[in-house]
């Protein structure tokens, strides 16, 4: 794992986006297409803004999947990840091939179909964040590290649901759905490359645990340490608790 620390969130996002654009462009040059997995949430705002403005990427040759979606949430709700992807990625690029997770449909069937589409060909790069409770996608602790299912229906814990309120997506915890569709841990790790974008002081403790603690389902993001090609992008706030020797060991 490589860890890159930047003084500001803006610098972090710019560097991560340049890395992501280069990875996508290389895949297109090598195979004529690139397949990507996109994370959502407040932590990804600046990164995605910079990425979609890249002139290095031929977006017509990109296929997009995303990590997760709330069960039962309408697409026009401000917290809908389908809405997020549409507004922040698809309408700002020429991507024509994509699959959005429909949390209003038969979610078991959505998981099945999305998994088949996702595994039809290898994924070149996945973009991920880390939750305040250490979650990866919507795999809250204790996460299922064993399942080979590409997508799961999961229950969201209180810490995860409170994070969504804190970020302004919902008015109260009572408004946050209790279940979601999530890409599984093992499926995320099947991506050829993973780029983590994790800013903000509220992520400092889970970042430290993911990089320095045990690899355990109780800290789902720790699973990233089992992947051979992960680069984690941090700002000064999210890296504040990480020991200098840890950064040196992974860099």
Image (cartoon, helix red, strand yellow):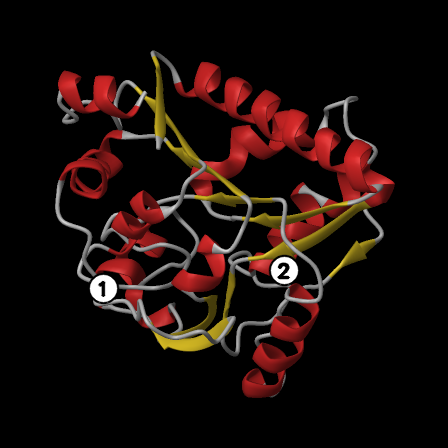
- Does residue 120 appear left or right of residue 125 in this picture? right
How far across and down, in percent of the image, does residue 132 sit?
Answer: 25, 48
**Mark drawn on residue 141:** 1
Quadrant of image for the N terminus: top left
Helix, strand or loop for disc 1: loop
Q: Counting other residues with Cα less than 10 Å from the Cα at mark 2, is it few (<14), some (14-19), or many (20 or more)?
A: many
Give the vertical position of 221 relative to 74 (above or below): above
Residue picked out by circle 2: 82
Helix, strand or loop for disc 2: helix
Q: How many labels does the image show?
A: 2
Give the vertical position of 19 relative to 114 (above or below): above
Rounded to the nearest angstrom, the CA distance separating label 2 from label 1 is: 24 Å
- Does residue 89 appear left or right of residue 148 in this picture? right
- Does residue 137 appear left or right of residue 14 in this picture? left
**Mark drawn on residue 199:** none
Frontmost of labels 2 and 1 is 1
How far across and down, in percent of the image, does residue 2 sit?
Answer: 37, 27
How far across and down, in percent of the image, does residue 94 sit?
Answer: 85, 41
Q: In this view of the protein, which residue sits in the foreground, 21 or 160?
A: 21
Residue 197 shows up from this direction: yes
Residue 94 shows up from this direction: no
Q: Give the residue displayed 34% in from the left and 11% down from the top.
A: 7
Q: Counting other residues with Cα less than 10 Å from the Cα at mark 1, is it few (<14), some (14-19), or many (20 or more)?
A: many
Q: Give the residue displayed 81% in from the left and 38% down from the top.
A: 59
Q: Give the residue displayed 42% in from the left and 63% down from the top.
A: 186
Residue reaching furthest to the top: 7
Q: Give the residue displayed 33% in from the left and 72% down from the top.
A: 146
Quadrant of image for the C terminus: top left
Tell me whether circle 2 and circle 1 mark residues in contact (CB < 8 Å): no
How far across and down, in percent of the image, does residue 119 sit?
Answer: 64, 66
């Amino acid at each position: 794992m490589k860890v890159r620390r930047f003084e500001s969130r803006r610098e972090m996002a710019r560097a991560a986006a340049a890395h992501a654009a280069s990875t996508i462009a290389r895949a297109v040059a090598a195979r004529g297409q690139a397949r990507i997995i996109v994370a959502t949430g407040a932590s990804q705002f600046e990164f995605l803004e910079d990425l979609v403005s890249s002139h290095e990427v031929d977006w017509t040759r990109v296929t997009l999947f995303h990590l997760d979606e709330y069960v039962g949430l309408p697409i026009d709700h401000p917290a809908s990840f389908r809405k997020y992807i549409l507004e922040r990625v698809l309408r700002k690029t020429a991507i024509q091939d994509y699959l959005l997770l429909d949390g209003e449909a038969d979610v078991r069937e959505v998981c099945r179909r999305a998994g088949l589409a996702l595994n039809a060909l290898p994924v070149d790069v996945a973009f991920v964040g880390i939750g305040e409770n250490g979650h990866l996608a919507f795999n809250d602790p204790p996460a299922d590290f064993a399942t080979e299912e590409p997508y799961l229906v999961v229950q969201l814990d209180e810490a995860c649901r409170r994070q969504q309120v804190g970020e302004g997506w919902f008015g109260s915890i009572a408004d946050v759905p209790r279940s979601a569709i999530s890409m599984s841990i093992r499926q995320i790790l099947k991506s050829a490359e993973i780029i983590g974008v994790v800013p903000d002081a509220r992520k400092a403790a889970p970042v430290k645990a993911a990089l320095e603690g045990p690899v355990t389902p109780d800290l789902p993001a720790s699973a990233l340490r089992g992947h051979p090609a992960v680069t984690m992008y941090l700002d000064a706030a999210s890296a504040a608790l990480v020991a200098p020797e840890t950064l040196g060991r992974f860099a």
